[in-house]
Amino acid sequence: PGGSQASAAIDLARCVIRTAERRVVAMAEQDLLTNSLIMMYLNRLGDLLFVLARYEDRGIPIERAT
């Protein structure tokens, strides 16, 4: 993660979304969630951000440990 500044920013946004997703799940477990679609939306948004970050890094050579 973070091959470029743009992909690093997208990865950071994904971390924020995953944190929000965990909090929403905790709310759902306590029956405090009124709209269950929020969980699905946050999950798919996190997936989208993952793909966007990888797309942003396309063409950047991968350094491998030897």
Image (cartoon, rainbow, N blue to C red):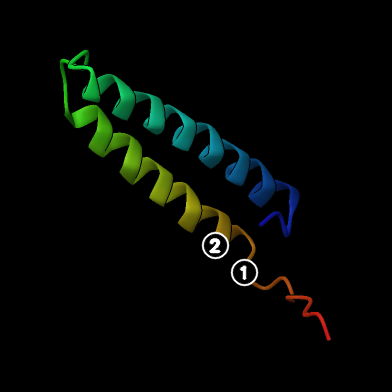
Image point (74%, 76%), residue name: 61
Q: Is residue 2 above or below residue 11?
A: below
Q: Seen in the image, is 47 located left or right of residue 52?
A: left
Choose between 34 and 55: the one closer to the eye.
Answer: 34
Seen at 37% across and 41% down, the residue is 45
Image x and y of residue 8, in percent: 68, 47
Q: Quadrant of residue 32?
A: top left
Task: Give, as a three-letter code, the residue at label 1.
Answer: Arg
Between the residue at mark 1 and the residue at mark 2, the CA separation in whole angstroms equals 5 Å
Identify residue for label 2: 55
Residue at which label 1 appears: 58
Q: Is residue 42 above or below residue 44?
A: above
Image check: 4 left or right of 12?
right
Side (left or right) of 19 relative to 12: left
Query: In the rendered view, does 58 fall on the left or right side of 29?
Result: right
Quarter of the C terminus within the rendering: bottom right
Residues at discs 1 and 2 in contact (Cβ within 8 Å): yes
